[in-house]
């Protein structure tokens, strides 16, 4: 979006220009698509939005009422930068139970996991540093690294994720500061990095002295298959992996609660960066979330059952909606299906025509750090019911046929 600044008043000089980095990094195409497709009649497969009807409204409301009734002075006061002890202790216990021994002092609570990414860019990167990312990559991570002035290099991969051999080669050639990955139910592709490749990533980072930033907002949304350990748990990764987590997909995104688990020096640097950013994450939200932890597993189990049904509805409808020659994946969890149309299709150019049929998706091109595959697109399946998904795919099919 182009912003035209008003001319200065007579007798005044223009204000200084904005920082160069703000012009080098564009806005989020996903957010812009959501703004354009906000009409209620549009079936929107574009956003990565959890289903609002599944939020534990009563449980969260009760937690806030209890916190404000029992400890109002604490809940409404400033807090420590690192986060509320009760929440950090609860998170540490959950991570330890899932196989990664964690102490409360290993954790920093953040205002959404997106803030965790921003803090890491401040703490770990200098302008001109090289960052390796998956290809394609989580879009907002590309924005963060761009604003930090980093040089972003994409690591090739396949349906199982990043290629370890390609990663090894780029680590040696590019001498990166860090490698960023969403290894479980990746955004945008929905793919999951197998255990043997996670071990290879850990070995490559250990040999070359590279930070690993492991972003994990989706792993609790598993619908089939066996869980894969975090990269942070593999030999060689222990002292160089920062693990990001979030309540946005399993509790509610409006709470804006995330966390990062990091080695002591990196954790301290992120805490200093957070002090400069917002001092601390809202106290009342943290205390309420801590009270919701005991009921979180049953809640997530209910969400998984609904999302599994919605994933299956989308997979069942795609053959009738997509043109011959299109391919797509079957994610074991998460929120997204990744589609590759025949080479003659440009998903970005086609989107306005599809939106005229009151349905929307996200083109794949903005997710690439390097040369984009313009035939790709991302579909989110969790926000709509199965009947809405069925109707949305019928509309998508009509829009795609109008291209051919």
Image (cartoon, grey):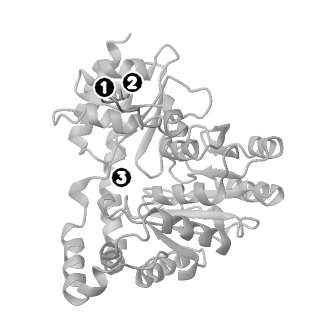
Report the residue at 52% width, 55% height from top: 118
Kindly report which numbered mark, 2 or 1, lies closer to the viewer in this rendering: 1
Q: Which residue is mark 1?
A: 396
Q: Which residue is mark 3?
A: 308
What is the x, y in percent for residue 290? 36, 79
Considering the numbered disc 2 on the image, is that residue within a helix, a strand or a loop?
loop
Circle 2 residues within 10 Å: few <14, some 14–19, many ≥20: many
Considering the numbered disc 3 on the image, is that residue within a helix, a strand or a loop?
helix
Circle 3 residues within 10 Å: few <14, some 14–19, many ≥20: many
Q: Quadrant of the C terminus?
A: top left
The image quarter in which residue 45 lies: top left
Q: Is residue 286 above or below residue 169?
A: below
CB under 8 Å between discs 2 and 1: yes
What is the x, y in percent for residue 22? 49, 38
Q: Quadrant of the N terminus?
A: top left
The image quarter in which residue 319 lies: top left
Labelled disc at residue 322: 2
Q: Gap between marks 2 and 1, in whole Å?
A: 8 Å
What is the x, y in percent for residue 135? 61, 38
Query: Looking at this view, is 331 or 175 the one in front?
Result: 175
């Amino acid at each position: 979006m182009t912003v035209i600044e008003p001319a200065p008043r007579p007798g005044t000089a223009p204000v200084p220009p904005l920082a160069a980095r703000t012009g080098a990094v564009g806005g989020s195409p996903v957010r812009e698509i959501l703004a354009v497709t906000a009409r209620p009649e549009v079936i929107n497969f574009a956003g990565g939005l959890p289903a609002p009807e599944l939020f534990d409204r009563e449980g969260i409301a009760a937690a806030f009422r209890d916190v404000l009734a029992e400890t109002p002075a604490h809940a409404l006061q400033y807090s420590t930068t690192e986060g509320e002890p009760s929440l950090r202790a609860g998170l540490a216990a959950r991570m330890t139970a899932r196989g990664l021994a964690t102490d409360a002092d290993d954790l920093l609570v953040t205002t959404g996991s997106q803030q965790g990414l921003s803090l890491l860019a401040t703490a770990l990167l200098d302008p001109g540093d090289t960052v390796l990312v998956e290809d394609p990559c989580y879009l907002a991570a590309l924005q963060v690294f761009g604003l930090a002035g980093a040089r972003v290099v994409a690591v090739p991969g396949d349906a199982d994720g990043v290629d370890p051999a390609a990663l090894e080669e780029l680590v040696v050639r590019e001498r990166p500061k860090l490698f960023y990955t969403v290894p479980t139910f990746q955004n945008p592709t929905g793919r999951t990095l197998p255990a043997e490749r996670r071990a290879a990533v850990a070995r490559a980072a250990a040999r070359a002295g590279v930070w690993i930033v492991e972003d994990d907002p989706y792993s609790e949304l598993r619908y089939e298959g066996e869980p894969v350990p975090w990269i942070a748990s593999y030999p060689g990764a222990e002292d160089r992996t920062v693990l990001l987590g979030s309540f946005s997909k399993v509790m509610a995104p409006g709470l804006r609660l995330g966390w990062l688990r990091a080695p002591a020096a990196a954790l301290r640097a992120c805490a200093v960066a957070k002090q400069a950013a917002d001092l601390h994450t809202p106290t009342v939200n943290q205390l309420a979330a801590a009270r919701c932890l005991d009921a979180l597993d049953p809640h997530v189990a209910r969400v998984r059952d609904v999302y599994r049904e919605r994933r299956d509805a989308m997979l069942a409808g795609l053959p009738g909606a997509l043109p011959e020659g299109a391919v797509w994946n079957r994610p074991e969890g998460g929120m997204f299906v990744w589609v590759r149309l025949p080479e003659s299709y440009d998903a970005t150019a086609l989107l306005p025509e599809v939106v005229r049929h009151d349905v929307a998706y996200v083109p794949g091109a903005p997710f690439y750090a390097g040369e984009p595959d313009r035939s790709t697109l991302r579909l989110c399946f969790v926000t709509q019911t199965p009947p809405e998904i069925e109707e949305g795919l019928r509309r998508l099919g009509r829009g795609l046929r109008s291209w051919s």
